[in-house]
């Protein structure tokens, strides 16, 4: 099962760090956006052993490279540190061969070259290098997008064998920890039902099955929350009259891989459009089924799309995105389900094409169902077109043309665009309102309460997303390093642009994670948020937007055997080496562990570990943020877990993880360092000149080291000999740079 495979992989990754016989090895985990993962151990040191390979890089031998190449050859005999078919008691870490003559070139491609060279951003003021500059790329042969190059696979297998040899003595502990983690997860569970029209919609999972079940049930007046007909164990419906509208377990039968792209209900709620990836290549097929008969009405087996789908104003129109050769969504198509019969979408209408390969396209509908939005965005620039779905003769129009380093998002409410943007080189996104027309940039006006702009794009308050309802606008963002949700009340005059009331949702805990839940109805005053903290399991809370004190907990995630009174969490800050930057830090631990430390003054033995994963194990779907998962230690002494990421503006939230209990119950103190490179303190925490992007990346490493030193020298919570750390994905760069490059003495 999927979640079991993930848990085994992560457990083995951590156990490697626990080996004391060969402490110079560590494990890295890389996870793609599609959820695919591979694990390989990596050595902190090297020796003379090398592996050879066959070349596959597009930069393998350019005309310039041939003129300066050495005698190394792709046909060199492959030599591994050990055979991948045997696992001796003591092994040396395998070391990949360096090809000192291998280079890549950056700049203007010489005449006659048929490869695209790496270059700076299209918005850069610097001229391209001409002639191009050679950049050493000694490990470029390991770049294998196909995941099939035998030389690369041989090396990874050797790394895995080396890992196995170091962790054989941990096999029993691994099994124990795995069973504890499984026991902390309620596998049979459900997502909070949410209303749309005459139905409640929700998903659920069943123990022993790997995939989600999509359901709906008729709305009745006698349903109360939390749902009383569900005890968390039975497989029968949780609401009267439940209808399974899509069982992904059935889709996955006979497939080696299955991942859902979109699941979209038609405006009449009689049809269901969904897309699925069966290869792991992030390419989807899509289907339309009749919810009354459960029969598939439309399926084009030759049409591959990105996975994104959106319905038109009625059940006859569907929008989707096609991919280019690099799997970039670049074309928006409209399909008329009543007339389309040709294969591969030949009858479908192309609405918009994005030819700049820096930009990816996306589609979404306004909550009121009036507009389709088509977004083209790069990392630093965006452009959005709109289509009036109520006008059959409407064409796509641009809200504001793209401008270098200007990002914006759009929502619609009562004839107005509500726009979040960093226009004007603002450090964070500001909130604007403007008439819902094309080319509206000159009319953008800051949203105010009286004379006070609510989101001016300042350093103090960042804005991430805006959701528009009929009489309210809900903004989510960050303030003080914590996720926040604000409710803007517009009053009875639905077309008004002036905000009558502006309030932030408040919670009792100092550090927490909060985000919007699913909302399918525009005409509602009921807001649903997902809330959790390091010691509070995730809750689904319904809040009356006309009176924010009126709250109902619709559901709390069940955690078998968990007693929150045994645990505590702290939020503090650490001053960085520049003397001015304050780095947020979150800790969680068992209360008795900290009491013993305070009484004895002894340092807490520490295993410093951080993991970056994309989503939770299969129960309540995670909110939009990235999350951390934790694991293992093979002794009962107190320990510190110290996770790190610090990249792409992604935030490490102070959220709850049931599988973390296996660590806390062994005396581990778990610490999150919210270092620069993430987005915890707003975009400025990531962007130049004070964040950790581009030439400021070293701030990520320095902040991580500064927090580690604070835990040892100032907080006196731990000692170097019992302190360790780990990062995943981009967090792997953090750990590698910290241990091997920035301050080697910190080892």
Image (cartoon, helix red, strand yellow):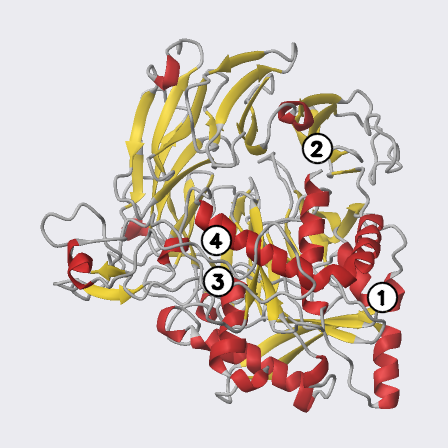
Q: Position of residue 367 (x, y in %)?
A: 52, 36
* Residue named by callout 2: 202
> Element at badge 1?
loop
Q: Is residue 200 left or right of residue 259?
A: right
* Alpha carbons under labels 1 and 4: distance apart: 52 Å
* Residue named by callout 4: 498
- Asked if the residue under mark 1 is in contact with the one under mark 2, i.e. CB atoms within 8 Å, the reply is no
Q: Position of residue 561 (x, y in %)?
A: 90, 54
> Element at badge 3?
loop
* Alpha carbons under labels 3 and 2: distance apart: 31 Å
Q: Residue at 66% x, 90% y: name it.
A: 713
Q: Residue at 79% x, 20% y: name it.
A: 241
Residue 698 shows in this picture: yes
* Alpha carbons under labels 2 and 1: distance apart: 34 Å
Mark 4: few, some, or many residues within 10 Å (few <14, many ≥20)? some
Q: Nearer the viewer, mark 1 or mark 4?
A: 1
> Element at badge 4?
loop
* Residue named by callout 3: 649
* Alpha carbons under labels 3 and 1: distance apart: 32 Å
Residue 521 is drawn in which quadrant? Answer: top right
* Residue named by callout 1: 665
- Measured along the vertical axis of the image, is residue 633 above or below residue 10? below
């Amino acid at each position: 099962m999927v979640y079991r495979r993930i848990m085994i992989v992560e457990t083995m990754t951590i156990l490697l760090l626990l080996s004391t016989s060969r402490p110079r090895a560590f494990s890295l985990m890389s996870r793609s956006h599609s959820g695919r993962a591979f694990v390989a151990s990596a050595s902190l040191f090297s020796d003379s052993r090398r592996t050879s390979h066959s070349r596959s890089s597009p930069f393998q031998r350019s005309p310039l490279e041939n003129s300066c190449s050495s005698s190394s050859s792709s046909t060199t005999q492959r030599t591994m540190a050990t055979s991948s078919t045997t696992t001796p008691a003591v092994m040396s870490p395998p070391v990949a061969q360096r090809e000192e003559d291998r280079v890549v070139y950056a700049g203007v491609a010489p005449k006659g070259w048929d490869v695209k060279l790496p270059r700076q951003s299209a918005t850069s003021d610097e001229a391209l290098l001409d002639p191009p500059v050679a950049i050493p790329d000694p490990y470029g042969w390991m770049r294998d997008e196909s995941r099939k190059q035998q030389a690369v696979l041989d090396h990874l297998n050797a790394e895995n064998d080396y890992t196995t040899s170091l962790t054989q003595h941990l096999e029993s502990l691994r099994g124990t920890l795995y069973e504890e983690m499984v026991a902390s997860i309620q596998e049979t569970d459900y997502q909070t039902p949410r209303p749309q029209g005459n139905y409640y919609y929700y998903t659920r999972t069943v123990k022993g099955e790997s995939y989600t079940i999509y359901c709906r049930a008729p709305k009745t007046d006698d349903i109360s929350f939390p749902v009383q007909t569900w005890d968390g164990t039975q497989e029968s419906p949780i609401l009267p009259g439940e209808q399974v509208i899509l069982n992904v377990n059935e889709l996955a039968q006979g497939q080696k891989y299955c991942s859902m792209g979109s699941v979209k209900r038609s405006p009449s709620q009689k049809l269901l459009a969904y897309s699925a990836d069966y290869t792991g290549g992030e390419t989807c097929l899509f289907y339309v089924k009749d919810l009354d008969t459960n029969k598939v009405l439309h399926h084009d087996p030759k049409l591959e799309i990105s996975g994104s789908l959106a319905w038109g104003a009625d059940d006859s129109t569907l929008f989707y995105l096609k991919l280019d050769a690099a799997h970039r969504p670049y074309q928006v198509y409209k399909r008329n389900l009543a007339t389309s019969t040709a294969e591969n979408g030949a009858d479908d209408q192309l609405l918009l094409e994005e030819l700049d390969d820096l930009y990816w396209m996306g589609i979404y509908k306004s909550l009121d169902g009036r507009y389709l939005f088509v977004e083209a965005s790069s990392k630093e620039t965006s452009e959005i077109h709109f289509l009036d779905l109520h006008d059959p003769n409407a064409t796509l129009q641009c809200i504001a043309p793209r401008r270098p380093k200007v990002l914006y998002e759009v929502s619609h409410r009562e004839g107005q665009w509500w726009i979040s943007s960093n226009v004007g080189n603002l450090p964070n996104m500001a909130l604007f309102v403007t008439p819902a027309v094309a080319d509206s940039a000159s009319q953008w006006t800051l949203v105010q309460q009286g004379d006070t702009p609510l989101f001016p794009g300042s350093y103090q308050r960042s804005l991430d997303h805006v959701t528009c309802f009929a009489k309210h606008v809900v903004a989510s963002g960050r303030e003080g390093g914590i996720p926040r949700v604000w409710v803007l009340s517009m009053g009875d005059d639905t077309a008004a642009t002036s905000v009558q009331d502006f309030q932030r949702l408040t919670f009792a805990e100092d550090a927490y994670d909060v985000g919007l839940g699913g909302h399918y109805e525009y005409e509602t005053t009921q807001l649903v948020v997902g809330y959790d903290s390091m010691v509070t399991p995730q809750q689904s809370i319904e809040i009356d937007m006309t009176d924010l004190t009126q709250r109902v907990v619709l559901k709390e995630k069940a955690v078998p055997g968990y007693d929150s009174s045994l645990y505590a969490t702290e939020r503090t800050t650490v001053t960085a080496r520049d003397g001015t930057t304050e780095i947020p830090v979150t800790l969680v631990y068992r209360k008795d562990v900290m009491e013993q430390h305070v009484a004895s003054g002894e340092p807490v033995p520490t295993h410093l570990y951080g993991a970056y994963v994309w989503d939770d194990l299969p129960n309540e779907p995670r909110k939009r943020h990235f999350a951390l998962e934790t694991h293992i230690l093979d002794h009962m002494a107190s320990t510190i877990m110290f996770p790190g990421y610090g990249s792409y503006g992604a935030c490490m939230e102070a959220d709850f993880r049931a599988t973390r209990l296996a660590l806390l119950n062994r005396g581990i103190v778990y610490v999150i360092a919210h270092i620069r490179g993430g987005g915890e303190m707003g975009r400025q925490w990531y962007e130049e000149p004070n964040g950790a992007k581009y030439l400021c990346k070293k701030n990520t490493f320095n902040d991580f080291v500064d927090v580690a030193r604070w835990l040892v020298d100032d907080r006196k919570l731990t000692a170097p000999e019992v302190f360790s750390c780990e990062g995943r994905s981009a967090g792997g760069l953090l750990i590698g740079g910290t241990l091997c490059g920035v301050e080697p003495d910190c080892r």
